[in-house]
Image: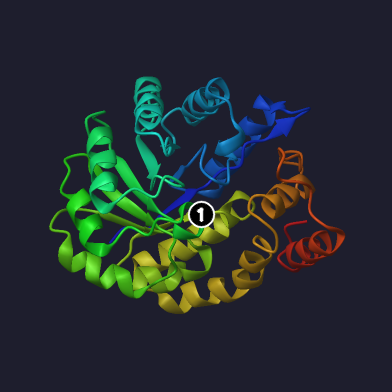
Amino acid sequence: MTAETYTAIVTPFKNNKVDEQSLEKMVEFQIKGGVTGIVPCGTTGESPTLSHDEHNLVIELCVKIANGRIKVMAGTGSNSTDEAVMMTNYAKKVGANSCLIVAPYYNKPTPEGIYQHYKALDKCGIPLFIYNVPGRSVINISDENLARIATLENVAGIKDATGDLARIATLRLLINKKFSYLSGEDVTAVGYNAMGGNGVISVTSNIAPKMVSDLQRATAIGDYKTALEIQDRLTALHDVMFCETNPIPVKYAASLMGLCSAETRLPLVTPSTSAKEKIEREMKKLGLI
């Protein structure tokens, strides 16, 4: 069994521009921490506020910095199919290993529309991961439609951020091909793997890549005793990473470690004083600062 750790990496800003130097520092920190890969331009990377040029730049920089040492799963989803295809083709062109495609949000397409969205993207010819995150997209792709989408040639896996651990049991019976099941919620990672998953796309690993990777490696060899010990140490940190809207807390945490600034783009703002205190307290407990 494999158990992979992907980091939903933040996009560092400096004076409202992409901070390339800090991005390199972040990627190198992930490589040193032993992660499988990074996911640039996802929700944690503030993709809604990136221009197309910035979006392309961040993906290209991540591929260049990683240089084959870890995988790059580029976030290229959109609620416009044409836009998603455009961004996915660019990610393929610059050497991304795969793309993460969020369910088309806001438009509220029918199940057939969702399937046709992924079918159009399948033609890009790069491995695709479905991102099912109803808390952000409003769309919750049904198990039956997920299984149908999975029949597409280049659909290789799913990031499941529903928090519903029972779903993976059903999906594993419905999907008849080699398929990656990745938890989209840090706090469910151990349980998700125990139910048949094989990894996580993590927010917390931005600041604790080694611990998150060690947890995944423990589950891969069936050492759930060690995995639970790590989970117990990380649970409070996972919690404070979402004490305010992601990525506000994790960017502040990364700034405390000197990895990047805490700068976000409107409508996201810096964390409240109480949130800062919670984040600092938990990071100190783990020796991160």
For this orientation, the residue located farthest to the left is: 176
Where is residue 168? Give x, y as percent.
Answer: 30, 68
Element at label 1? helix
Quadrant of res 193: bottom left
Left or right of 39, for residue 2: left
Left or right of 172, for residue 219: right
Q: Residue at horizontal 78%, vertical 27%? A: 15
Quadrant for the C terminus, please.
Answer: bottom right
Q: Which residue is mark 1?
A: 136
Where is residue 258? Give x, y as percent.
Answer: 77, 42
Looking at the picture, the colour scheme in use is rainbow
Numbered marks: total: 1
Q: Nearer the viewer, residue 9 or 76?
A: 76
Q: Nearer the viewer, residue 15 or 120?
A: 120
Q: Nearer the viewer, residue 262 or 213?
A: 262
Name the residue type under label 1.
Arg
Q: Is residue 212 visible?
A: yes
Q: Residue at horizontal 58%, vertical 76%? A: 232
Structural crowding at the residue carrying mark 1, measured as other residues with C-alpha within 10 Å and reported as few (<14), some (14–19) or many (≥20): some
Q: Is residue 285 above or below residue 146?
A: below
Q: Is residue 28 visible?
A: no
